[in-house]
Amino acid sequence: MRKKDHRNGMLFWRNPEIKRQLTGYLALSAVLLLAVWLCAGQAAKKESWNVRREICRVALAGTGGALTLAGIFHFAVTARRYGRLAGLSEQVDDFLHSQRDPDFTVQEEGELSILQDEIQKMTVMLKQQADALFREKRYLCDAITDMSHQLRTPLTSLNLIQAMLSEPEISRERREELLYRQKTLLQRIDDLLVILLKMARIDAGVVDFKREQVRLDDLVKKAAEPIWIPVELKEQKITFRGDGQAVFLGDRDWSAEAVGNILKNCMEHTPSGGRIDIFWEENAVYTELRVEDSGPGIAPEDLPHILERFYKGKRQGEAGFGVGLAFARMVIGAQNGVLTAQNRPEGGARFTVRFYKRVI
């Protein structure tokens, strides 16, 4: 500790600003002492030489003592201030290199206290930014891992199909079957990449959602268009019931795609001959849309996670990637809305969308 203090003391006197102050102090002291000598001599010129010399000596001693005390006080206060600044510098350096939270001691009121407060605010802000960056990196790593996992299965199947197609003795019917499966897998991969790109744009905040009045009856009809053919093939029935004047402020195209993913999920989990019911209404607080199906519902252990990205429940099967409902939640949430999932008391799943009229 003594070595450190000695080193700090040496650095203090090597400081260019301290050198200038010391030089100025010594020059000013010399000028003042000379002036005191001359003034004392002039005042005592009528006295004898011994008396005059004694008067000058006393005047010089008093002035020199006062200058010495003033110099000691000035440089002691300056050294103390520089010591505090060095302490702050060491804590900031320690924070930058070790990411440990700085332990600022309470300074007295003044400029150093203000500087300490500002440095403390800066370190808190830097730590928050570092934490946010770490979370973003971890999220990106998890997303890439999930994407690679989701793509591995169809790519493996494509490689197997390609190997089967290369067999010389394959029949025409078998070839057509494999080509159809290959086309289906390629379409699944394309759909996954498209929806992941859209989700990444929403995460990045680069999607400019429109703020226009959207009629619910138009929205649900547009959302249901892509699933009409598979609904007919499964002999399912879709019913629409709601207020024809119900509207909300949002983006029609993005919202239709989000609701379409909800309808697609219900269609895939509803058995042949089942039904999907769509209800909507508007009140003073929000506009609500409910989608219900007659399927087996959502497993209790899946309910808390069913809207998470890449989550596949027990009843999901191999057809989905677990991104449709997560995409719907992101789109609806970006428009001041909320998507919830639950089971109906009489059986089946229920998805509720609420677009709030004010920010919640």
Image: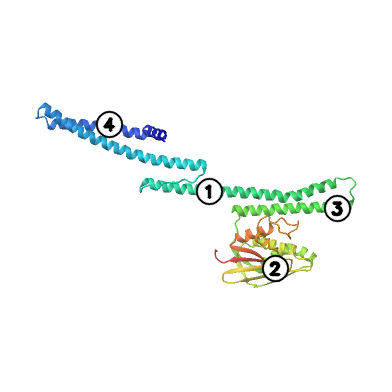
Question: Residue 152: image x %, image y %?
Answer: 74, 48
Q: Which residue is mark 1?
A: 129
Q: Are marks 3 and 1 in contact (CB under 8 Å)?
A: no
Query: Which mark is first along the chain, 1 or 4?
Result: 4
Residue bearing the label numbered 3: 176
Nearest-to-viewer mark from 2 and 3: 2
Q: Nearer the viewer, mark 3 or mark 4?
A: 4
Q: Amino acid at mark 2?
A: Glu
**Residue 340 drawn at (x, y percent):** 64, 64
Q: CA distance from mark 2 to mark 1?
A: 42 Å
Q: In terms of secondary structure, where does tag 4 sit?
A: helix
Amino acid type, label 4: Ala
57 up-or-down from 249: above or below: above
Whether residue 34 sits left or right of residue 345 in the image: it is left
Q: What secondary structure is marked by label 1?
A: helix
In percent of width and height, residue 185 lies at 77, 52
| Earlier sequence position, callout 4 versus callout 2 | 4
User: Is residue 351 left or right of 121 when viewed as pictured?
Assistant: right
Q: Amino acid at mark 3?
A: Glu
Q: Residue at x 43, y 48 (%)?
A: 118
Label 1: how many residues lie within 10 Å, few (<14), some (14-19) or many (20+)? few
What element does badge 2 sit on? Answer: strand
Q: Residue at x 62, y 53 (%)?
A: 201
Residue reaching furthest to the top: 49
Helix or strand or loop: what does disc 3 sit on?
helix
Question: Which residue corresponds to mark 4?
Answer: 27
Mark number displayed over residue 292:
2
Residue name at image x 75 percent, y 58 percent: 317
Q: Earlier in the sequence, mark 2 or mark 3?
A: 3
